[in-house]
Amino acid sequence: ANAKMVLDKDYRIAEVDPRLYGSFIEHLGRAVYGGIYEPGHPSADDQGFRTDVLELVRELKVPIVRYPGGNMVSAYNWEDGIGPRDERPRRLELAWRTIETNQMGTNEFADWARKAGTEVMMAINLGTRGIDAARNLLEYCNHPGGTYWSDLRRQHGYAEPHAIKTWCLGNEMDGPWQVGQKTPDEYGRIARETAKAMRLVDPDIKLVSCGSSNSSMPSFPEWEATTLDHTYDEVDYLSLHQYFGNHANDSQNYLAFTMELDRFVDTVIATCDYIKAKKRSRKTMMLSFDEWNVWYHSTDADRKLEPWTEAPPQLEDVYNFEDALLVGGILISFLRRADRIKMACMAQLVNVIAPIMTENGGEAWKQTIYYPYAHASVFGRGVSLQPLITSPKLDTQDFTDVPWLESATVYNEEEATVTVFALNRHLSETLTLDAHLGGFADYGIVEHVVLENQDLKAVNTAGNATVTPHNRGRSELTEGHLQAQLNPASWNVIRLR
Ligand code: AHR
């Protein structure tokens, strides 16, 4: 079967914000302890950071990392994580019912982020706390000195402010599981007032208002409308969260979940624009998709864990090949809404529903989903072009008219490169892609990278990289006419220059 695509240098969706390829580290399971931080590990540096993990993170070119939660932040006292380590309290961590030792905190994470070449997206506690804790934390992080909290930071060894730009006003405050869950009006009010106080401390920060925890929440999208009615003028982004799973073990249906994702994003945009119209505002609300991934493999194992242990193996999904295909599809969806989605965080980064896995004291390795994420982050920087796609379609259990082909193209003007990301989601049929690339007549193919595997359930484990990309994809490019073979169930990255 054939799919057609037409695009042109001048048909632009938007400049891709590099923060679209962000990630997330929560104090949860072994993300911090045994993940990014493990003093005593053979690869640990003088601060106890695992350099094997740092290397894998750097390779992903992660531009921003959300921290310290997640659900955890809603009962977190940030002051527990600063000052001399041996004086820090051990606490009951209520979200995940573990023991938090507080050996990592704000300053250590800022150090880790610098070493990883990334920026911090800081979340504040609007569950058990509020305006006061938020403005103090911001003063501690960003004020140069000469005040109580900024001088305390200096006393802790950090003369320079951390200059954290992006701040999340709480986390999933609509969720009954959240410590300090709020009604939309309660959240809207506290988020707005906290935003105002934070901007007085540092007018240069960017703020994220909490959206629904997922598109199935009964209060979606009323939550967005009501909370934005309060926060619209004070914030820069609205957050979205969504996780996927092949619960019914129906792979063709699973790979069509990006249809649901697109619908979710469209609805959130429509709701933002409704509030914009209602307020006669000139500001367009941008989106921060600050939690997204596949999450379902570990759910049963997690139920069996004993509470109140330190850094237990929670949410340790072992991803298979089909998960990588869906992750590729999600990234394509984001690129095609690059006009409104400015930040996104794959949740999470290490061990906890993550592209990178580690053994305590042992190896660190790439899960299957690492690859599409790395490809998009490394090659998907530039302008997202608007493709016109004609593709054969299929029906699945939950979706009709699902195109076999999902594709996005990013043009990097500076480097004069073009990257076509293409997912053939059909499980058994090859697709020939015929693409007309207007304005790129003198380009040739650099490489055609493919992630494919006979076994949709194939996984990578320590020392066992079963699912890895190759660059023997078949494509030809003559005078701006690209013909590419997209194998069944394959993720393709066609790089042109
Ligand atoms: O990423 C895991 C959890 O998922 C986060 O803590 C929470 O915000 C979401 O429900």
Image: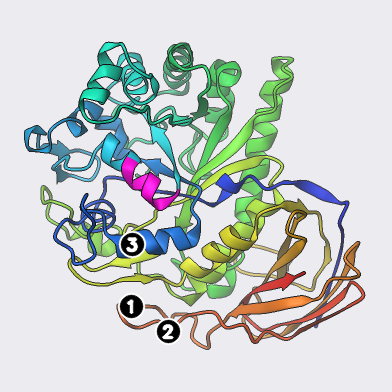
Picture layout, residue 490 above or below residue 16: below
Q: Residue at x 86, y 51 (%)?
A: 11
State how far apart marks 1 and 2 are (Cα).
8 Å
**CA neighbours of label 3 inside 10 A, class few (<14), some (14 to 19), many (20+):** many
Side (left or right) of 225 relative to 476: left
Viewer-proximal residue, 330 or 278? 330
| Mark 3 or mark 2, earlier in chain | 3
In the picture, the quarter occupied by the N terminus is: bottom right
Residue found farthest to the front: 159
Picture layout, residue 336 above or below residue 317: above
Q: Please name which of the two marks, 3 or 2, marks the residue nearer to the observer.
A: 3
Q: Residue at x 33, y 18 (%)?
A: 130
In the picture, the quarter occupied by the C terminus is: bottom right
Residue 157 inside the magenta-drawn segment: no
Q: What's drawn in magenta, residue-wise?
A: 111-117
Q: What's under tag 1, amino acid-wise?
A: Thr
| Residue beneath disc 2 | 466
Residue 116 inside the magenta-drawn segment: yes
| Residue beneath disc 3 | 53
Q: Residue at x 57, y 58 (%)?
A: 377
Q: What's under tag 2, amino acid-wise?
A: Thr
Q: Contact (CB < 8 A) between labels 1 and 2? A: yes
State how far apart marks 3 and 2 are (Cα).
20 Å
Viewer-proximal residue, 233 or 95? 233
Question: What count of labels does the image hold?
Answer: 3
